[in-house]
Amino acid sequence: MAFMVKTMVGGQLKNLTGSLGGGEDKGDGDKSAAEAQGMSREEYEEYQKQLVEEKMERDAQFTQRKAERATLRSHFRDKYRLPKNETDESQIQMAGGDVELPRELAKMIEEDTEEEEERASVLGQLASLPGLDLGSLKDKAQATLGDLKQSAEKCHIM
């Protein structure tokens, strides 16, 4: 961090003091890029190497995020039987092919799936009807079943 501050402020400070120096011409044309930045050649090479590594790291993270989003989109395409998208598949392949969803997204999808399965069941459909009390319906069904058992015991044919 101190290296970055020195690099940024040092160059600006030299430019400022150079312009205040008067009419002296130092011949900036023959300076290398490292000298123009106010660094030695080794420092400049290290700085350039750090920049390249940071860029590669950012690009890898960006590619990973794009692949995670593509995985999520392809999951929903499969779920809702929509046509597949070639760009999503290529993004997943660029990230290595084995991309997992983030935990939060996977948890949300799992909860949605459970809710949809619950709604798809018969009891889920009944529960969604307005003005229907499942407790009283259950009591009535049990009472009817009990009555049927009693009448079956009294029946002489059975």
Image: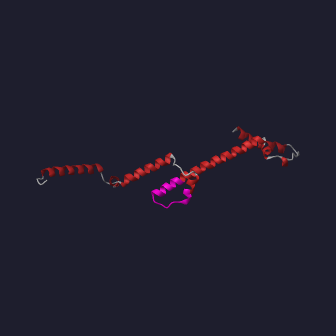
In this view, which residue lies farthest toward the bottom? 83
Identify the residue at horizontal 85%, vertical 48% (top origin). Answer: 30
Residue 101 rendering spot, x and y as whole percentages: 51, 49
In the drawing, does residue 79 fall left or right of residue 31?
left
Q: Quadrant of residue 47?
A: top right
- Horizontally, residue 8 falls left or right of residue 141, namely right
Q: Give the side of residue 95 with respect to residue 106, left or right.
A: right
User: Can you name the residue that lies furthest to the left here?
Assistant: 156
Residue 77, how many percent across, how many down?
48, 58
Which quadrant does the N terminus fall into?
A: top right
In reply to whether residue 84 is colored magenta, the answer given is yes
Asked if residue 76 is positioned above or below residue 42 in the image, the reply reads: below
Magenta residue span: 70-89
**Farthest residue in the top direction?**
2
Q: Residue at x 26, y 50 (%)?
A: 138
Task: Confirm whether residue 76 shows in the render.
Answer: yes
Q: What's the magenta bit mostly, secondary-structure-wise?
A: helix
- Residue for point 59% across, 51% down: 63
Q: Position of residue 132 (x, y in %)?
A: 30, 53
Total numbered labels: 0
Q: At 80% across and 42% down in the image, what residue appears?
A: 14
Looking at the picture, tell me which residue is in the foreground, 114 or 137: 114
Q: Is residue 95 left or right of residue 134?
A: right
Give x and y (percent) for residue 109.
46, 50
Give yes or no for residue 148 being in the magenta stretch.
no
| Residue 8 in view, yes or no | no
Q: Nearer the viewer, residue 99 or 115?
A: 99
* Colour treatment of the image: secondary structure
